[in-house]
Image: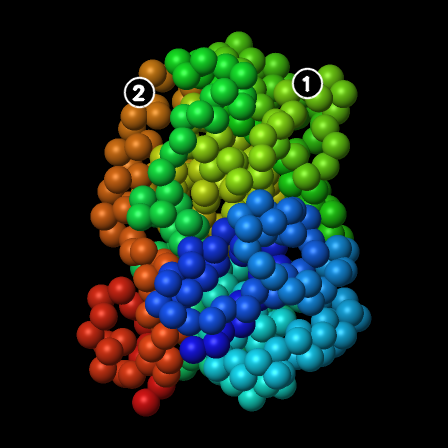
């Protein structure tokens, strides 16, 4: 098969890197198309993954702007002579390019957009044009007959033990001994209009660093500038080593989304706090908190500080989180194997889907 893979963010690069490797290992030809956003291009280069830059619009974090038609046409022109059999991506770009190429599209997406009407409308639009819409089983919405729920998370495409082994040499990069405890804070840019008020304030960030410093080193990963009072704590490691940093941390606190899930799935005590924490939160976060107790979703900085101190003072916290991670891995499945099976086996048969315990939800295509 000839397959086009679209990656728009660093998280999507991580999601597809092992899927691409498995597809190529099976003899398929894969074309990766990338958007210039954040660390996406740097990560592709670090991983030595060849790609075509179909979009050089770094300002698209807040959604799709007027460059979308141009970007889709750019991708189409690159792919039209390559006899592509199928496209896959996070939707929109891959989906609309597939329609121009007149080939099937498999979309994976775990962004429920539960509190954002504009993003939900885009998700629904993508759903109308894609051929298979894959989500985690924790996805709360039921989108229709093309919606396939799987017992996994996107992060298990690269953090499942089949693909990820922690490397303790990261302590050398951090400049601390392997017996040294440390905490990690991650701050998002939250630079869209609908994100206003979502972030922790500078004063809250400074206070957190000072409190956690009493229990070990503190490292900060941030998409935006941090206050000068805590700038010395900014993390300086290659992008590809961030998961090692998370794995060995005693505690992870973040106002972001993907990295909260990553740390939880690595068995690191994780606190997520932003304005989106509520009863209508994304299903992944609700499941990780209520069913597996790997994640704490807290609303206020005061709650975060109190819980962080409680967790870090307990010498058994990390061990308990690792045990809970083990229980999760017994239930959740290898996302790479799932996606490769869907792509190489397209179109999926009703019988095969019904017989596969990996899948929850509806049978897809006759």
- On the question of residue 10 being in view, the answer is no
- Residue located 37% across and 83% down the image: 347
Quarter of the picture holding the N terminus = bottom left
Q: Is residue 184 above or below residue 336?
A: above
- The quarter of the picture where residue 68 lies is bottom right
Please report the residue visible at 42 percent of the width from the left and 49 percent of the height from the top. Answer: 158
Q: What label does residue 316 carry, if any?
A: 2
Residue, disc 1: 232
Query: Where residue 30 appears, x then y in whole percent?
Result: 49, 69
Q: Where is residue 344 in the image (x, y as percent from the top left)?
A: 36, 74
Rendered residue at 61%/83% (across/down): 81
Q: Is residue 166 above or below residue 127?
A: above
**Of all residues shown, which one is farthest toward the top?**
214
Q: How many marks?
A: 2
Closer to the camera in the image, 202 or 22: 22
Tell me the element at label 1.
helix
The answer to whether any part of residue 163 appears in the image is yes
Residue 210 percent across, percent down from the top left: 61, 14
In the figure, 288 relative to 237: above or below?
A: below
Q: What is the quadrant of residue 64 in the picture?
A: bottom right
Q: Report the side of 152 relative to 215 (left or right).
A: left
Q: Could you classify mark 2 by the number of other residues whose Cα lies within 10 Å: few (under 14), some (14-19), or many (20 or more)?
A: few
Tell me how far mark 2 sits from mark 1, CA to CA: 29 Å
Q: Which mark is residue 273?
A: none
Q: Is residue 195 left or right of residue 47?
A: right
Q: Classify 220 as above or below 141.
A: above
Image quarter (top left, top right, bottom left or bottom right) of the C terminus = bottom left
């Amino acid at each position: 098969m000839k397959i086009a893979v679209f990656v728009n963010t660093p998280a999507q690069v991580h999601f597809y890197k092992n899927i691409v490797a498995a597809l190529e290992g099976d003899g398929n030809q894969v074309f990766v198309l990338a958007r210039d956003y954040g660390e996406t291009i740097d990560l592709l280069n670090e991983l030595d993954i060849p790609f075509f830059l179909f979009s050089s619009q770094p300002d698209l974090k807040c959604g799709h702007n007027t460059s979308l038609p141009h970007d889709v046409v750019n991708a189409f022109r690159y792919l039209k002579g390559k006899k592509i059999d199928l496209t896959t991506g996070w939707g929109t770009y891959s989906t609309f390019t597939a329609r121009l190429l007149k080939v099937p599209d498999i979309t994976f997406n775990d962004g429920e957009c539960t509190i954002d009407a504009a993003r939900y409308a885009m998700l629904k639009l993508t759903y109308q044009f894609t051929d298979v819409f894959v989500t985690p089983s924790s996805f709360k919405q039921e989108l229709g007959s093309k919606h396939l729920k799987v017992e996994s998370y996107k992060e298990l495409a690269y953090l499942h033990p089949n693909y990820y082994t922690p490397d303790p040499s990261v302590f050398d990069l951090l400049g601390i001994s392997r017996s040294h405890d440390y905490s990690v804070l991650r701050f998002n840019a939250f630079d869209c209009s609908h994100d206003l008020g979502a972030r922790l304030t500078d004063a809250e960030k400074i206070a957190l660093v000072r409190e956690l410093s009493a229990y070990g080193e503190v490292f900060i990963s941030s998409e935006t500038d941090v206050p000068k009072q805590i700038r010395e704590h900014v993390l300086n490691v290659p992008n590809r080593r961030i998961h090692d940093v998370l794995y060995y941390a005693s505690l992870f606190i973040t106002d972001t989304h993907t990295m909260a899930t990553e740390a939880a799935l690595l068995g690191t005590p994780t606190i997520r706090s932003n304005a989106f924490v509520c009863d209508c939160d994304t299903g992944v976060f609700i499941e990780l908190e209520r069913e597996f107790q790997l994640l704490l979703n807290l609303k206020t900085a005061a709650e975060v500080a109190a819980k962080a101190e409680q967790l870090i003072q307990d010498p058994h916290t990390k061990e308990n989180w690792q045990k809970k991670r083990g229980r999760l891995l017994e239930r959740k499945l290898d996302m790479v194997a799932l996606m490769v099976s869907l792509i190489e086996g397209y179109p999926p048969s009703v019988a095969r889907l019904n017989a596969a315990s990996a899948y929850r939800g509806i049978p897809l295509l006759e």
